[in-house]
Amino acid sequence: MVDWRTWAGESCNARTRFRIGGNVKRPIQHQIASCAVAAVRHQWNMQGHAVDEVKEDYGEDLLVQTCLDGKVDASRIWVQVKGTDRFRENPAASLPKIRVKAAQILRWSRSADLVVTVLWDVAHDRGWYVMPQGFFDPVELWSSKDRQVALTFQPDCIFHQQAVTELAWAARIEHANRGLQYARHNISESKEMGLQVDLEFHKGVWWTLLFDFAATIGIIRPDDGQVDEAFALLVMEMTWQHSVPDVLETARRATFMAIIEVFDRRCAGSGAPLALVKELAEVVHPRLFTDELLDVLRRNHHKTPGGRGPQER
């Protein structure tokens, strides 16, 4: 007669994998990990983002395709999730650190997509996040790829719905900025090499990227490409706040500052890369400040705070 212990796996040194009845044990660490991934995924899903769980796990657990107003963005976010059931009884106590191989962080630093690591407390349904890109010396990471690097979480970097909004905007802004700078480089290179077909192609890439992003943040209207009325009014307000004796310089400053203000209002405080602001201003300024409008500004410039009246000239 075959002994049930032998049949269940004792003879192949696997008895610790089985309970009575043949059920495979599931370690508590696996349960915590699954709960953490599900909770973090839910935070993204609540805002309508498309989230896929990564089956081939090379350090990332979720791939987020960000969405805005029901439309899928071109930007992506990779999310690593670490679960814990250890909570801080003392609010002043530090959060658990995560140790990751230097080679992993180096790979993230070279990714065109945003990478986020989330520490999720399954016991209290709360989490914190860190963005490891840009915080480590690439030479040190490259020279010691097998070394373990500690990711530290700050108590004020809480992973909640506001954080999801901010991260989604950070991904959109980074994608637009990176794409526009790459297109600019290719335009310059095509001009230098006299490649007219390539030049027209890369100009098209640059223009469509810029147009779509300007429409996304509400600077232009997506239906006809004209400057949005609310943005135009904001620029006019800025001409009073940032007026200087030169009308053209006033118009440039007003456009620049209005774009930064729109970033602040629309993009969840995610910041405005200088290069991206310059690209937007280059296109918006001539569309907004026509010759007729500049003439009006010149006639009334002495009324603005920075203008000079006829008696001062």
Image: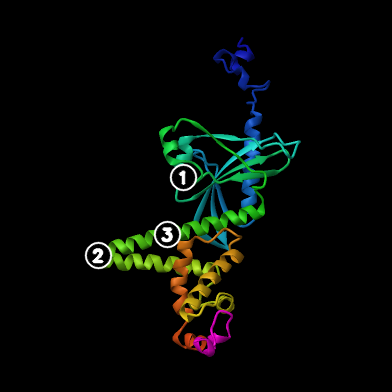
Q: Dot 3 corresponds to which residue?
A: 179
Q: Label 2 crowding class (10 Å Cα cut-off): few <14, some 14-19, many 20+? A: few
**Element under label 1?**
helix
Query: What's the magenta region?
Result: 298-313
Residue sticking out furthest to the front: 312
Q: Secondary structure at mark 2?
A: loop
Image x and y of residue 31, in percent: 65, 34
Residue occupied by mark 1: 109
Alpha carbon of mark 1 to alpha carbon of mark 2: how far? 33 Å
| Closest to the observer, 62 or 176 | 176
Q: Nearer the viewer, mark 1 or mark 2?
A: 1
Mark before the other along the chain sequence, 3 or 2: 3
Q: Is residue 295 above or below residue 233?
A: below
Picture coordinates of residue 96, whole percent (x, y): 64, 35
Q: Who comes first in sequence, dot 1 or dot 3? A: 1
Residue type at numbered disc 1: Ser
Quarter of the image containing the N terminus? top right
Q: Is residue 309 magenta?
A: yes
- Residue plotted at (39% across, 66% down): 206
Does residue 42 appear to the left or right of 253 in the view shown? right
Q: Position of residue 296 (x, y in %)?
A: 51, 88
Image location of residue 309, percent across then percent down: 54, 87
Q: Label for residue 38?
A: none
Residues at marks 1 and 3 touching, judged by CB atoms closer than 8 Å = no
Crowding at mark 1 (Cα within 10 Å: few <14, some 14-19, many 20+) = many
Which residue was labeled with disc 2? 195
SS of the residue under disc 3: helix
